[in-house]
Image: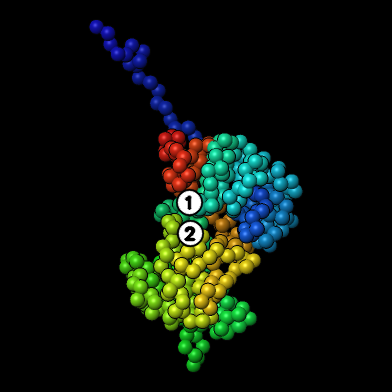
């Protein structure tokens, strides 16, 4: 009678211990952003200094930090190599940038490299993904990285800037010098306070409400989740009017308000909350700030605008519908992004590089949409009709 194992296979074997993780040296390239609307940079000189102190290598394209007021000299003093040749930046095995790769950069990036940048899924097509697949690129979306609590740190932090700045932008647009109705946003003794309506309950909405309340404005906030509305009341520590999306209540609020802000943070397309008919009943010279415009906008009258020409009028209501509002404040946004990216990069180095880090860091793995040329993101696969593979089947 045969037995399934021979005698040697039945002998006890030595225990296999886990292999010690060896720290890796990263070679990071920071190219200058070439998109007209993008003025941020992912790493500040201080962040570069921290990476250099941990034996990593950073190559920065000359002028990469100009819009954020970080000079080449500052990067050089921090230990970075300043490179004038745009092509040489893309010889680095790890590319870190804000905007997704453009067509030229898709050609320049070396096969089997890693790119960490925003994805902006709405504006990506089959060609972009196919080009990365051909080069077997590992691609990580900054906006999809998650923290230990499951939150999206890049999205939350940039939404905080957007919420803050929405109030400052509205104040500017209401002034007579900006063709507004010459009203000061806030609460001046003897003058009725500015009335602000906010749609949404995410980070941008919360910080818009906080900023408005701090300058004495009256705030009304709408969202369809009563639990979120209750949570916001608690966070603000200030009684404000809240309501679900009831058309009659919304119309009544819009008739009286001076500023209306669309501030949805969701990864899903923004619901259209305010119809053209509702906008037509708003006061002449009032202002709409649609922070959610990059996901469709929540006002039917919203149309995509740019930092160069940010506003238009519809029904004598000033509309500001610029996507990527944080890029209006590139230094603040760059420092913020740098504070998030630096610990991630240091951790990747400590774990021996991207390959090992993805096995050990769920938050980083959540940001991956291509792994060595294999599409791993279900949403992209469904949107573009491309087959995808769960990343957990690729990383062991």
Instruction: Give SS at disc 2.
Output: helix
Viewer can see residue 233? no
Q: CA distance from mark 1 to mark 2?
A: 15 Å
Of the pair 188 and 379, the residue shown nearer to us: 379
- Of labels 1 and 2, the one closer to you: 2
Left or right: where 255 falls relative to 26: left
Of the pair 86 and 92, the residue shown nearer to us: 86
Residue tagged by mark 1?
A: 144
* Residue at point 44%, 39% (across, down): 388
* Residue at point 45%, 38% (across, down): 387
> Would you call the spot at circle 1 few (<14 residues within 10 Å), some (14-19), or many (20 or more)?
many
Instruction: Give SS at disc 1.
Output: helix
| 195, above or below 104, in the image | below
| 36, above or below 368, in the image | below
Q: Residue furthest bottom?
A: 190
Residue tagged by mark 2?
A: 295
């Amino acid at each position: 009678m045969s037995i399934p194992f021979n005698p040697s296979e039945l002998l006890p074997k030595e225990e296999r211990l886990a292999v010690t993780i060896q720290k890796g040296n990263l070679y990071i390239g920071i190219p200058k952003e070439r998109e007209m609307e993008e003025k941020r940079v992912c790493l500040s000189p201080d962040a570069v200094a921290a990476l250099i102190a941990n034996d990593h290598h950073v190559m920065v394209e000359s002028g990469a930090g100009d819009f954020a007021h970080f000079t080449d000299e500052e990067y050089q003093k921090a230990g970075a190599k300043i490179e004038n040749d745009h092509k040489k930046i893309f010889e680095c095995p790890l590319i870190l940038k804000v905007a997704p790769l453009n067509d030229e950069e898709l050609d320049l990036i070396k096969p089997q490299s890693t790119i960490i940048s925003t994805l902006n899924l709405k504006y990506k097509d089959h060609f972009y993904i196919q080009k990365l697949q051909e080069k077997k690129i590992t691609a990580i979306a900054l906006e999809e990285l998650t923290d230990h609590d499951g939150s999206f740190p890049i999205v939350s932090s940039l939404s905080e800037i957007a919420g803050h700045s929405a109030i400052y932008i509205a104040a500017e647009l209401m002034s007579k010098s900006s063709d507004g109705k010459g009203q000061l946003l806030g609460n001046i003794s003897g003058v009725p306070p500015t009335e602000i309506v906010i749609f949404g309950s995410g980070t941008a909405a919360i910080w818009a409400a906080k900023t408005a309340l701090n300058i004495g404005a009256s705030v009304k906030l709408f969202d369809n989740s009563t639990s979120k509305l209750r949570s916001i009341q608690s966070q603000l520590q200030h009684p404000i009017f809240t309501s679900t999306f009831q058309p009659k209540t919304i119309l009544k609020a819009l008739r009286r308000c001076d500023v209306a802000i669309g501030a949805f943070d969701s990864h899903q397309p923004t619901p259209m909350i305010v119809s053209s008919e509702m906008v037509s009943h708003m006061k002449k010279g009032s202002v709409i700030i649609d922070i959610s415009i990059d996901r469709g906008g929540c006002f039917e009258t919203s149309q995509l605008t740019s930092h160069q020409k940010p506003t238009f009028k519809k029904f004598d209501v000033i509309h500001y519908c610029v996507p990527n509002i944080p890029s209006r404040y590139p230094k603040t946004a760059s420092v913020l992004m740098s504070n998030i990216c630096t610990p991630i990069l240091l951790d990747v180095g400590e774990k021996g590089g991207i390959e090992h880090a993805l096995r050990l860091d769920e938050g980083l793995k959540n940001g991956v949409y291509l792994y060595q040329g294999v599409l791993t993101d279900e949403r992209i696969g469904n949107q573009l009709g491309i087959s995808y593979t769960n990343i957990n089947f690729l990383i062991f």
